[in-house]
Amino acid sequence: MNGLHRWSVVVAALVLSLAACERRPANVFPETAAREWETARNSGDANAMAALHTEDAQVLPPGAPVVEGRAAIRTFFRNLFEQRVAPAAFDERDIIVFGNIVYRQGIYSVTLADGSTEYGKFIQLWKRVDGVWKIHRQMWSRNGPPLAARAEDASE
C-alpha cells in the first residue's frame, strides 16, 4: 500500500506540473487596432473606417437611426466627415476581453470649427474575424452642448 500511495503522489505531481507548463495564447486586444480606428477617424477616411467594421456591423450614432452594414457605414462616415472632421482625442477607460469579443469604453473630446469643445463618451464592441479585430457595434454621445472657447487672458 505504501508503494501505491507513493506512485499516486508522483503521478499527481506530474499532472500538476504539466498543467502548470501548458501555454495558451493570451486573450489580448491589440492597442494597434484601436489606434488604427482613431487614425482613420481623425484623418476623415471613410473607406478606412468602413474597412475596420465587420460586414454586419452596426453603428448607433446619437440622434440618428442605426447604420447597418459596411457599405452603409462607409456612406455614413463619408457624409459625417464632409460636415466636420475635427481630430478628436480619445481616452480609453475600460476594456474587457471575452475570447473573440472585446468591450471597449472611453471618453473623447473634440475642438469644433468655432473653437468650442465637445466632450462625450463611446462604447465599442470589437469582434475577431479570421484573426483580425473588427468593430462589430459602436455608439457614442456627447455629454451636452459644446463648451464655448475661453477668451484668452489679455495679459498673456
Image (spheres, rainbow, N blue to C red):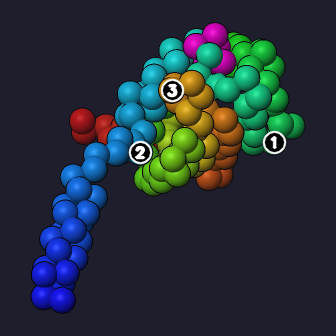
Which residue is depicted at the point 54% across and 41% down?
100
Give the CA distance from mark 3 to mark 1.
Answer: 33 Å
Instruction: Find numbered disc 2 in the image and state the secondary structure of the residue it sits on.
Output: loop
Q: Main secondary structure of the magenta part?
A: helix
Residue span colored magenta: 46-50
Residue neighbourhood size for the residue with mark 1, other residues' Cα within 10 Å, grouped as few (<14), some (14–19), many (≥20): few
What percent of the width, then of the height, locates residue 6? 13, 79
How many numbered marks, from 0 up? 3
- Asked where in the image residue 45 lies, by quadrant, the reply is top right
**Residue position for label 2:** 27
Q: Answer left or right for 31 relative to 111.
A: left
Q: Earlier in the sequence, mark 2 or mark 3?
A: 2
Q: Is residue 61 visible?
A: no
**For mark 3, what is the residue?**
131
Label 3's element? Answer: loop
Residue located beneath label 1 in the image: 63
| Quarter containing the C terminus | top left
Q: Amino acid at mark 2?
A: Asn
**Residue 23 percent across, percent down from the top left:** 28, 46
Residue beneath the point at 25% across and 63% down: 15
Judge whether 50 appears above or below 119 on screen: above
Callout 2 environment at 10 Å: few (<14), some (14 to 19), or many (20+)? Answer: few
Between the residue at mark 1 and the residue at mark 2, the CA separation in whole angstroms equals: 35 Å
Q: Is residue 51 magenta?
A: no
Q: Nearer the viewer, residue 25 or 123?
A: 25
